[in-house]
Image: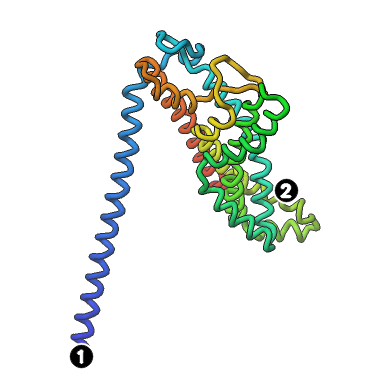
Amino acid sequence: MTIAESSFRSTGRSRFRRSLSAFMAGLSIAAAIIACVALLSVLVYIVINGIGSISLSTFTEGPVPQGQPGGGLRNGIVGTLILMSIGSVIGLPIGILGGVYQLETNTTFSRTLRFFTDVLNSIPSIVMGLFAYLIVVLPVAAFSPGHAFSAFAGGVALGFLMIPTVMRTTEEILRLVPTTLRDASLALGASRWRTTWSVVLPAARGGIVTGVLLALARIAGETAPLLFTAFGNLDFNVRLDHPIDALPLNIFNYATSPYENLHHLALAGAIILLAIILILSLAARYALRGQTME
């Protein structure tokens, strides 16, 4: 083979690679545009059809009998905040400590735990709701049938949903902390747990907060687990041992109702839920920005 023939073949392969790269980049751009158009279509439809139903009464009034005008989403908004708070109390300590354990140990158990954490991240939320139903609702029903469905049971289901997300996020963020910080702390005589608590965790607090906020944004819109646990409540309730309402339940029930005014309330609830998730997502981006600056 002459030098000219080798150069010609090399040029041909280079052109083919560039053409293939441009083609795949075009496919990626097209896929991204399709995804954005689909997302924007949903958002625009919800905002256009639901923004007119948002008023002060939406936040201050509870539900009215079906078929009658008026009503609001007060019960669902308060219930969602309560359920998210219970889920955070249950899920955050377990998730953060579990992430620290997975990072600081390299045993067969920790590797197995990491594998099952990844599996739990992909499990449908309705499975978590069924699990909470089996371990909370049914045992309580055996002793006190009137308090079987409750805000606590709903919070347990949402807390279980938070755990795998927070665990994996915490572990990956802690891996980004420079090993020199750990070595410097250990060289000064600090114990391993003191190093983790006083050096590693503060250095990664921005990323950990990001994972927490993303987990909260995920559970804010969950409906299936609450059908098995919180159940919903037409009356205003803040007691943890009674059924409680939530925005996702409101949206589900009102959207399937035959009444037009409830359809508008469902769209208003969707806008409020989107606003909550948007605020949490923006807070997560700000926390991640703070972590990057550090």
**Badge 1: few (under 14), some or many (20 or more) residues near its Cα, within 10 Å?**
few
Query: Mark 2 falls on what kind of element?
Result: helix
- Determine which residue is flagged by label 1: 2
Q: Position of residue 155 (x, y in %)?
A: 62, 32
Q: Is residue 139 left or right of residue 234?
A: right
- Determine which residue is flagged by label 2: 197
Quick one: quadrant of the N terminus? bottom left
Residue 283 visible to an observer of this rendering:
no
Q: Is residue 273 above or below residue 72?
A: below
Q: Is residue 280 above or below residue 175?
A: above
In terms of sequence position, does the residue under pointer 1 or pointer 2 come before the other? 1
Q: Position of residue 201 (x, y in %)?
A: 67, 48
- Of residues 6 and 97, which is closer to you in this image? 97
Q: Is residue 117 left or right of residue 252?
A: right
- Dividing the picture into quadrants, the one containing residue 275 is top left
- Residue pushed farthest bottom? 1
Three-letter amino acid code at the position of disc 1: Thr
Distance from disc 1 to disc 2, alpha carbons, whole Å, reads 67 Å
Three-letter amino acid code at the position of disc 2: Trp
Q: Residue at x 42, y 26 (%)?
A: 270
Cβ atoms at labels 1 and 2 below 8 Å apart: no
- Of residues 11 and 292, which is closer to you in this image? 11
Q: Residue at x 78, y 58 (%)?
A: 188
Q: Residue at x 48, y 36 (%)?
A: 282
Query: Mark 1 falls on what kind of element?
Result: loop
Q: Position of residue 99 (x, y in %)?
A: 64, 50
- Of residues 106 and 179, which is closer to you in this image? 106
